[in-house]
Image (cartoon, grey):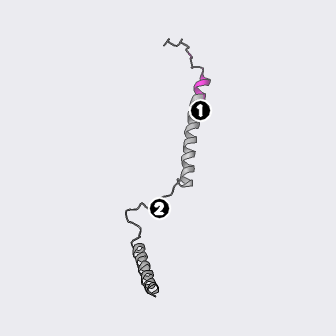
Amino acid sequence: MMRKRNFWPLLILANVLCLCVLSFYRTSPAAPGKQIPFVNPAEQREIMIEELKQLNRLLREQNTLLSSGKLAVIVAPQPAR
């Protein structure tokens, strides 16, 4: 009999304690905001296009230098270590 009498108040007390603990949970204003893990695809394409244009410019300069005949290669022996 005593066991039955203590069961319900203890169950109610346990539920109240759980609700109190759960009520403390909330998002903190100091938490970082949602950030996109990757760059915007349109922005990423623009960056890639710009890099490819720069590579094309450098290749044109290199081809111009090679085809001009003004390139001189000097081979020197490597100093002994």
Q: Give the range drawn in magenta.
A: 63-73
Q: Which of marks 1 and 2 is nearer the N terminus?
A: 2
Q: Position of residue 10 (x, y in %)?
A: 42, 81
Residue, disc 1: 60
Q: Where is residue 53 in the image (x, y as percent from the top left)?
A: 57, 41
Residue at 53% in and 55% down:
40
Q: Where is residue 5 in the image (x, y as percent from the top left)?
A: 44, 87
The residue closer to the viewer here, 10 or 27, is 10
The residue closer to the viewer here, 80 or 8, is 8
Q: Is residue 66 magenta?
A: yes
Residue at 44% in and 62% down:
33
Q: Is the residue under label 2 in contact with that under label 1 (CB below 8 Å)? A: no
Furthest-left residue in this view? 30
Foreground tag (1 vs 2):
2
Amino acid tagged 2: Lys
Q: Quadrant of residue 50?
A: top right
Which mark, residue 42? none
Residue, disc 2: 34
